[in-house]
Amino acid sequence: MSLSFSMSLRNTRANAVITTLDSGVEHGTAKFYTGAKPAITGSATSETLLGTVTFSKPCAVVIDGVLVFDIIANEPLAKANGVIGWGRAFDGDGNFVMDFNCGTNGSNAVMIFNNLNVIAGGVISILHGSLTEGNL
């Protein structure tokens, strides 16, 4: 499949993600798990939950087709030991929004960490996050 979107459509799609994450009473959240991201998005997982972070509200801005997350609050007390493999985002009412990959600097992951290794009781700190609406 090959698709090419206008910048206007790319911005609209990215803004729809922001609107969805920001919906609900509370701030949206992201949970981080060990292992591989499920093949079926949003499906139940048996992977270990390492911790949860809270998005700001609004959670991001869009610049030229790129959704750039605003400051994301650190998880002050990680729940388990493990290596972050992927994340799952929820809106402010706890409804599933998206699954995403995680990595370190130099990767093309949505959420970038200095270190993917987590120690129970330690801090989960995200360096930055972005989602590029591109042409497929």
Image (cartoon, rainbow, N blue to C red):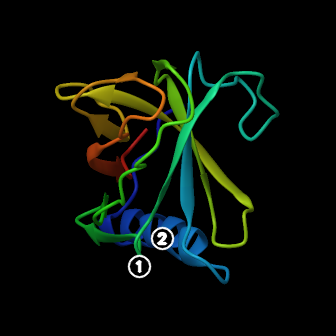
Residue drawn at point x = 42 percent, y = 24 percent? 119
Query: Is 71 on the left-hand or right-hand side of 101?
Result: left
Structural distance between the alpha carbons of marks 1 and 2: 7 Å
Query: Is 91 on the left-hand or right-hand side of 22?
Result: right
- Report which quarter residue 69 is drawn in: bottom left
- Report which quarter residue 44 is drawn in: top right
* Disc 1 to disc 2: CB gap under 8 Å: yes
Position in image of residue 105 (x %, y %):
18, 29
Q: Nearer the viewer, residue 95 or 54?
A: 54
Q: Quadrant of the C terminus?
A: top left
Position in image of residue 49 (x %, y %):
63, 32
Residue tagged 1: 58
- Report which quarter residue 12 is drawn in: bottom left
Residue drawn at point x = 25 percent, y = 25 percent? 107
Kind of residue at badge 1: Pro
Seen in the picture, residue 63 relative to 42 is either above or below; the reply is below
Q: Residues within 10 Å of mark 2 (few under 14, many from 20)?
A: many
Helix, strand or loop at label 2? It is helix
Position in image of residue 116 (x %, y %):
35, 23
Residue tagged 2: 18
Q: Quadrant of the N terminus?
A: top right
Query: Which residue is the extreme one toward the bottom?
Result: 25
